[in-house]
Image (cartoon, grey):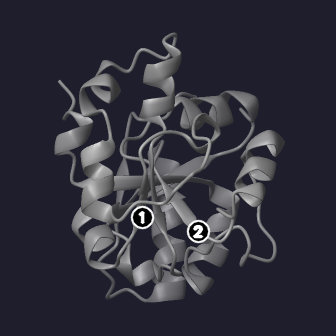
Amino acid sequence: MATPPKDGKLIYHLTSLDNLESIFMNGLLSREDVKDFIDVADKEIIEHRKEKKLNNLVPFHFFAGNPFDGKVQLKHPDKKYVFITLERIYAKKNGFKILPKHPLALDDCLLMDYDPGLEKIDWEKMRERDYSDRECKETCMAECLSEIKIDAKNFYAIYVKDEETKELVTKLRDKIIGKNNSIRVYVSNMFLI
């Protein structure tokens, strides 16, 4: 059985494999700061995030395979994706903010400090992962948001779909960051397609 989201140690950021070279070179940047990238988010979400002044933050989710991740992979089945992960302790130490539900479900999108924000998340509802239930779906897309650029050296791990992608990511990582880095690359079944 999977670890309940509340007890997880990581946060997850889904991106196109095509973005990884730039991320290794420049760090993980907010949508506002990045110059050229493959954007996988819905236009409606992008506009809402812009309106709520969230485009200057780097978003993470509390588990992989949430409704956003699934929708993106199903909408663009021709693309390869990776999950970039950070340890939650890193997020706490670096003052990441919390939205206890998906931004579209919140009227004010008031960013909360890390610990109080975690307390506001309905972890039991998130654990259900019933995406046919609107409240559960919105809760499963709670966000952990960074106001700072995240250098690749701070990544905990990168999760990929298969051995071929793992080899490609590992070579790219070693070429750009150097062979003496601590970023792990794992093959995982957390991808839909």
How crowded pointer 2 is (Cα within 10 Å; few <14, some 14-19, many 20+) is rated as many
User: What amino acid does circle 2 point to?
Assistant: Leu
The location of residue 189, given as percent across then percent down, is 39, 33
- Residue furthest front in the image: 108
- Whichever of callouts 1 and 2 sits on the residue coming sooner in the sequence is 2
Query: Which residue: 81% across, 50% down?
Result: 47
- Location of residue 190 by image quarter: top left
* Element assignment for label 1: strand
* Element assignment for label 2: loop
Q: Is residue 169 left or right of residue 64?
A: right
User: What amino acid does circle 1 point to?
Assistant: Lys
Depth order, front residue of 164/86: 86
Image marks 1 and 2: residues in contact by CB distance under 8 Å: yes
Instruction: Indicate whether 51 appears above or below 125.
Output: below
Depth order, front residue of 142/190: 142
Residue beneath disc 1: 97
The location of residue 181, given as percent across then percent down, is 33, 83
Work out whether residue 29 can be spotted: yes
Quarter placement of the C terminus: top right
Residue beneath disc 2: 57
Q: Is residue 158 left or right of residue 171?
A: left
Query: Which residue: 49% across, 24% down?
Result: 137
Depth order, front residue of 55/117: 117
User: Marks 1 and 2, how far apart in space?
Assistant: 9 Å
